[in-house]
């Protein structure tokens, strides 16, 4: 893992593995922490590895105020596009879709939804209800309906009873305390790192399946909805019975 800093603006790219094509996200805020960027890059590397792709996870941070954002993002895009590296970035927090030019990889919400719902139904084939933490995308709502799952409306989704909990709007949204209050059969990440390490351990102790985020969210890396469903279902099937937990099983597979 290394940090490559830019010369034209206050920005950096966290790169997990050198000399490999890279995929990841670009975020912009007054201060993007390198530690968090490294975690996101590593998560993407695991996703690529579990798909048997010899590529690296990357994560970009652009430090700029809202007033300076457009200039900073444009400078970042121009400089990274000139690097001798095949990097593709998806616009994330603080970066407008379409602003990354030649280095942008579209954020395909339909592929993400196809993968996460397939993962949940593979873990719990007889699931009938789902609860969502955060504001769900229209694509996720549609995929749940198409697969026969009823969404339970809840003000407190982390303590609501349902078969599946879809969570991912915030890194570390479920800590060990929240894990002990869950009333679901499986937690299905819709974004990176929504469970802390201790939360995963508590889920295992409590009989709640915590699925690996780098598998459930891999749909956009695959290419089409049918292939995403098949690939992610196959991986989840292979790790769901791991002696320790599905997350460790997926790490070993990667």
Image (cartoon, helix red, strand yellow):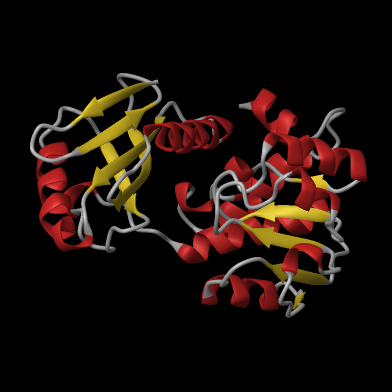
Residue occupying image coordinates x 73% and y 29%: 248
Residue 125 drawn at (x, y percent): 84, 59
Q: Is residue 46 left or right of residue 232?
A: left
Quadrant placement of the C terminus: top right
Residue 146 drawn at (x, y percent): 67, 76
- Image quadrant assignment for residue 37: top left
Q: In this view, does 46 lie above or below 149?
A: above
| Observer able to see residue 239 | yes
Residue 176 drawn at (x, y percent): 76, 43
Residue occupying image coordinates x 27% and y 63%: 96
Q: Is residue 112 above or below residue 207?
A: below
Residue occupying image coordinates x 87% and y 61%: 183
- Image quadrant assignment for residue 98: bottom left
Q: In this view, does 205 lie to the left or right of 219?
A: right
User: Of 238 and 106, which appears nearest the observer?
Assistant: 106
- How many numbered circles are shown? 0
Residue occupying image coordinates x 58% and y 32%: 50
């Amino acid at each position: 893992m290394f940090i490559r800093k830019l010369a034209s603006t206050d920005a950096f790219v966290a790169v997990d593995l050198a000399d490999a094509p890279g995929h990841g996200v670009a975020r912009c805020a007054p201060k993007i922490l390198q530690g968090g960027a490294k975690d996101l890059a590593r998560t993407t590397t695991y996703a690529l590895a579990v798909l048997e792709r010899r590529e690296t996870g990357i994560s970009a941070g652009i430090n700029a105020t809202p007033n300076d954002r457009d200039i900073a993002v444009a400078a970042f895009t121009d400089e990274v596009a000139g690097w001798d590296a095949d990097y593709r970035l998806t616009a994330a927090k603080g970066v407008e879709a379409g602003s990354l030019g030649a280095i942008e990889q579209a954020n395909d919400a339909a592929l993400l939804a196809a993968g996460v719902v397939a993962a949940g139904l593979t873990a719990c084939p007889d699931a009938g209800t789902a609860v969502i933490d955060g504001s769900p995308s229209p694509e996720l709502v549609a995929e749940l309906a198409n697969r026969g799952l009823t969404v339970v409306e809840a003000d407190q989704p982390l303590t609501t009873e349902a078969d599946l909990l879809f969570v991912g709007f915030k890194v570390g949204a479920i800590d060990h305390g929240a894990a002990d209050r869950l009333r679901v059969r499986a937690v299905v990440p819709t974004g990176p790192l929504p469970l802390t390490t201790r939360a995963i351990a508590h889920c295992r102790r409590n009989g709640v399946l915590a699925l690996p985020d780098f598998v459930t969210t891999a749909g956009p890396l695959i290419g089409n909805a049918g292939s995403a469903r098949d690939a992610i279902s196959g991986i989840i099937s292979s790790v769901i019975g791991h002696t320790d937990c599905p997350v460790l099983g997926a790490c070993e597979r990667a």
